[in-house]
Image (cartoon, helix red, strand yellow):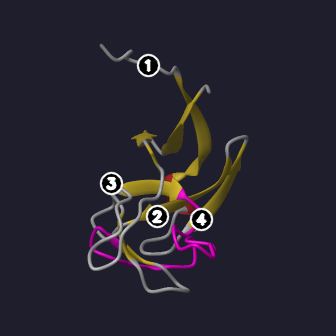
Amino acid sequence: MGANLIHKMTYVSVGALEDFHVRIGRVVHTQQGEIAVFRTTDNQLFALENKSPHRKGGPLAEGMVSGRMLYDPLYDLKISLESGLVQAPDNGQVKTYPVHVIGNKVLLGLTDE
């Protein structure tokens, strides 16, 4: 039987909602590294590790958002903002983070590892 690991989640304030512009990534510096936060045209927020899954890496915050997809600015990988999965024919995955908006405050969920 496999062990179920439970990690404690801490939510940190990363700014006000108006600080996050539609379809433009914003880099947030955390103790877990750089995280790119994106706001879609329907005002949903998504957070991904700010590192391309391509073997050469690169920043994702500069990518283009279309719907719920992010296009890697250097390698044109199509990445789901919801799951972090790279779409076929390519493969890979980017770590995702939960984001909540309470009032006007944007909160980013980080696990205590």
Name the spot of residue 65 as percent of width and height, x first. 39, 77
Q: Which residue is mark 4?
A: 51
SS label for mark 3: loop
> Residue 52: which numbered mark, if any?
none
Separation (CA) of disc 3 from disc 1: 20 Å
Residue marked by disc 1: 5
Could you tell me the amino acid type at mark 3? Answer: Ser
Magenta-drawn stretch contains 68: yes
Q: Earlier in the sequence, mark 1 or mark 2?
A: 1
Q: Residues within 10 Å of mark 3 (few under 14, many from 20)?
A: some
Who comes first in sequence, dot 2 or dot 4? Answer: 2
The residue that label 2 is drawn on is 38
- In this view, 26 is above or below 62: above
What is the magenta range? Answer: 49-69
Q: Nearer the viewer, residue 1 or 89?
A: 1
* Residue at 50% in and 74% down: 24
